[in-house]
Each structure stands twice: as structure tokens, then as C-alpha cells.
Amino acid sequence: MRAHTRAHRHTARAEFALPQEAASAGRARKLTSVFLTRPHRHVTKVDAERVDDATLIVSELVTNATRHGRSPCRLRLVVSDAQVTVEVHDASPVSPHVLKTGTELRADTERESGRGLAMVRHLAARLEVVGTGRGGKTVRAVLVW
């Protein structure tokens, strides 16, 4: 696991490489929590509710990437005075099923999976999937306040 952190223009960034294994989601939650609660110069402190929301989003996106991405994944976190951006990149070209705006976020309670992106969509101000042009994709969720 490698990490890179830098501060620039009132933002703080961190990037982590995570192996393709189930334990990566737990590692990603811990790394996210530590990064977001650490003081960053020139960046407003992230409140506890936003830390919890970002940690849940990271958990869901990393879980999807390690299950379906066919490769290790990369987690990137960016914090500014007004938002937290979570990006998870994997090598799979297959886009996850993302509910459209206005779609009811009701999930089938009998299913063991499939509710993660609905939760992410509910918590994030914006959720998007961007193809990399090299066969992979980045799933980006933005929390604002």
C-alpha cells in the first residue's frame, strides 16, 4: 500500500493503492477516517458527520472495485473548504449500475448486496463514472457542505 499526500491551493489530497482483496475496504475506511480528521493547513476541518459519510462512501466504492474490478484499486481523497471528493479507480471497463437522479432509493431487503451505490447516491451531492480510455474507470463521489 502506498500513500501520497500533498496540499495545494487550499486543498489536501491523498492517494492509496489497495490490493484486490476483501480486507481493502476496511483499510480504506481507516485511511479515510485518519486523513479526514487530521488537520490540514488552509483547509476547513471536516466535521464528524462528513467523515462518517465519506467513510461509508469509500467502503462501498472500494468493495465494488475489489469485487468487480479485476485488479487492485486506487483510492484518491481530496478535501477543500467546501467539499470532499472520493475517487476509486479500477481496471474494469464495466460501469456499475448507478441510480438516476429522482429514482426512488428503495432497496430490496431480501438481497444481500446491491444497495451500496444507492446509499452513495443518497449521501453524495454528485456521483459519476468516468472511463479512463485504457479499459478502466474511476467512480467519483462528491460531498459538499
Image (cartoon, helix red, strand yellow):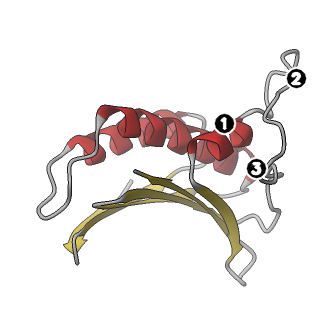
Q: Gap between marks 3 and 2, in whole Å?
A: 21 Å
Name the mark on residue 68.
Answer: 3
Name the mark on residue 108.
Answer: 2
Between 133 and 97, the one nearer to me in the picture: 97
**Quadrant housing residue 83:** bottom left
**Residue 120: percent from left, percent from top:** 63, 43
Q: Gap between marks 1 and 2, in whole Å?
A: 13 Å
Which mark's residue is nearer the viewer, 3 or 1? 1
Between 125 and 37, the one nearer to me in the picture: 125
Q: Is residue 1 left or right of residue 73?
A: left
Q: Gap between marks 3 and 1, in whole Å?
A: 18 Å
Q: Residues within 10 Å of mark 1 (few under 14, many from 20)?
A: some
Q: Which residue is mark 1?
A: 119
Secondary structure state at the residue bearing disc 1: helix
Q: Residues within 10 Å of mark 3 (few under 14, many from 20)?
A: some
Which residue occupies 23% across, 78% down? 9
**Kind of residue sitting beneath label 1:** Met
**Quadrant housing residue 117:** top right
Q: Earlier in the sequence, mark 1 or mark 2?
A: 2
Q: Residues within 10 Å of mark 2 (few under 14, many from 20)?
A: few
